[in-house]
Amino acid sequence: MTTARISTALGLLLAMLLSGCAENRDPQNPAAAHGDDATAVIAAKRIRVGVKADTPPFGSKSGETYIGFDIDIALAVAKQLESILKTPALEVEFVPVTSHNRIEKLLAGEVDMLVASMTITRYRDQVQNLDFTVPYFQDGQSLLVLKDSPIQSYQDLAGRSVGCVRGSTSSWYLNQVAPDCKPTKYEDFPSLFAALDAGQVDAATSDLLILMGRMRSAKDPAAYRIAGDRFTTEPYGIAVRENQSTWRDSLNEAIQQLWENGRWRVIADTWFGAQSAYPTQLNFGITPYPK
């Protein structure tokens, strides 16, 4: 397969825009009932991180151990937070989430943050009571089909059934680029890919690297192919509850430190470098966070 390409220009506007939104919201909102999560993390000396277990290379399990790019980012962020919050030896507790239930678990206080290949959107920020850090990665939506499928890109989807995961941005974007297709939502990625295998849908859509993860982990990777390049831009951020500016800003500082000290690049090369299972040409930068 040809090398995938990620490119982005991350300006101060996005960071400042999303940061500013959290400061002017209704204090009666239920999400505001939680105290400052930075204080809670310091008191507990523990961070509960919502992660996925069904989306390699971002999050999966090897035995009882969580592995993936998101997992390594979460661990590295926690390490930086020890000095930022002046709390040594922070314990990291991973809590499994899906695209469908991750927001519910965050708002219910079951996790302190989500590092779960989650796209930053204005809807999630303003309507679903979330706040986001600056982006720590970027991907884009594409299509996975069986190898003999006639589908070559999203332009071939009219009248065809396309599966996506409930709670993701995939169905919304799919409606924008292929309004005449027939979308079907599934509860999780295993259900989505099982439907593709069974011929219940003509294509599966999600972010490209998640689809590549399915191909790599399948018993017969040659049975699938990617149809077309990315047709969206999906910046990933760490999600927190709204009205948590101290907590969000601490996470922003940690992400920037990972970029400045080179740790982000080491993690990215592990999962997406030339010698990895998901070789991806990265052209990604993290804008200095305003202090």
Image (cartoon, helix red, strand yellow):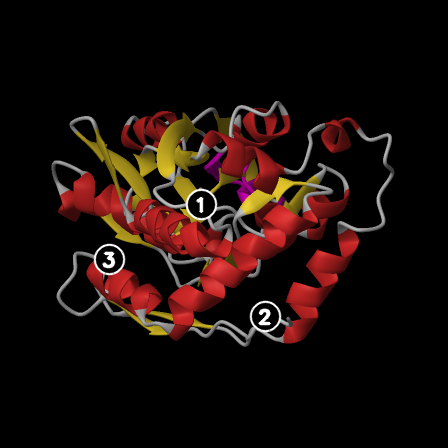
Which of pointers 2 and 3 lies earlier in the amino acid sequence?
Answer: 3
Residue 289 is labelled as 2
Instruction: Residue 193: name its quadrant.
Output: top left
Above or below, 186 against 255 in this view is: above
Horizontal relation, residue 1 to residue 284: left or right: left
User: From where the camera sits, is residue 129 visible?
Assistant: yes
Disc 2 element: loop
Q: Residues within 10 Å of mark 1 (few under 14, many from 20)?
A: some
Magenta residues (range): 159-172
* Residue at point 43%, 73% (across, down): 284
Q: Label 1: which residue?
A: 87
- State the separation of the CA atoms marked 2 and 3: 25 Å
Disc 3 element: helix
Q: Residues within 10 Å of mark 2 (few under 14, many from 20)?
A: some
Residue placed most toward the observer, 24 or 218: 24
Q: How many marks?
A: 3
Tell me which amino acid carries mark 2: Tyr
Q: Is there a contact, CB below 8 Å, between mark 2 and mark 3?
A: no
Q: Label 3: which residue?
A: 271
Horizontal relation, residue 75 to residue 131: left or right: left
Tell me which amino acid carries mark 3: Trp
Q: Is there a contact, CB below 8 Å, between mark 2 and mark 1?
A: no
